[in-house]
Image (tube, grey):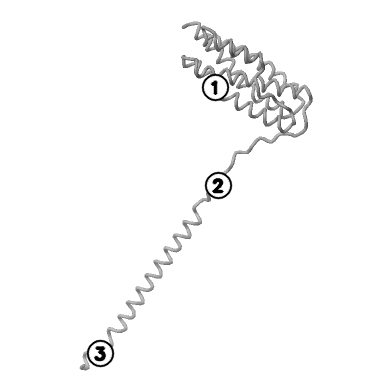
Amino acid sequence: MNFKTVLKSAFLLPVTIISLSACNETTTTETNKDSLDVNVTRETTPPVVTTEPKADVYITEKPTDKDATFLRDAYAGGLIEIQAAKDAQTRATTDHVKELANMILSEHQAANNKIKAMATAKQVTLDDNLTEKQRKDLEKLANEKKYEKQFADAMMKDHKKAVDLFEKFAVEATDADIKAFATATLPALRKHMDMATASKDKIKDM
């Protein structure tokens, strides 16, 4: 190895070291940048929050006999509306009567579920069976020649009675839960009554 070769090797060695050092710094910088990006992403991603629907909570104090009777009467009335609506779903042929039946079924089932929850909390016993009179009324309705007209008429009359009952207890109920329930349910009952009246009128014009 001559003198020129030695000098050339001595010159290249520092350059190589500097180059390797620069590469290492670049890699470290990029790694740190990636880590920072990950950290920023983790910090700015909002946590996933899931919430369960809260069940109604009712006062457990036993209501007066009058308020307890309202719960039983409202529940019994809901039972016959539910069964009549189920029958209409299979017997009715016109769209507006089917719509009426679907709405009554859905909303009376929801109302009866609330009544049952209240009754359980307040130690009020409910009867899940239709009365003999209710069964006979449903059988008579099912055998009507003009079924849809009679169904709409029956729903109109039944809901008029229900509106009167709920209006009374929305004012007179002693139990706060029962009063609130009667008040909150009235708009749906009025809607059912109005829709049943409209269905009956439509059938007259057909």
Q: Position of residue 67 (x, y in %)?
A: 75, 24
Q: Position of residue 116 (x, y in %)?
A: 67, 29
Q: Position of residue 169 (x, y in %)?
A: 72, 21
Up-down relation of residue 90 to residue 144 (above or below): below
| Marks 1 and 3, the one that precedes in the sequence | 3
Q: Which of 45/79 is in front?
A: 79
**Residue at horizontal 71 percent and vertical 34 percent from the top:** 58
Label 3 SS: helix
Residue for badge 2 = 49
Which amino acid does the dot numbered 3 rest on?
A: Leu
Residue for badge 1 = 103
Which label is found at residue 38? none
Label 1 SS: helix
| Marks 2 and 3, the one that precedes in the sequence | 3
Residue for badge 3 = 7
Which amino acid does the dot numbered 2 rest on?
A: Val
C-alpha separation, residue under disc 2 versus residue under disc 3:
69 Å
Label 2 SS: loop
Q: Characterize the local packing of mark 3: few (<14), some (14-19) or many (20 or more) Cα atoms within 10 angstroms.
A: few
Up-down relation of residue 28 to residue 67 (above or below): below
Q: Characterize the local packing of mark 1: few (<14), some (14-19) or many (20 or more) Cα atoms within 10 angstroms.
A: some
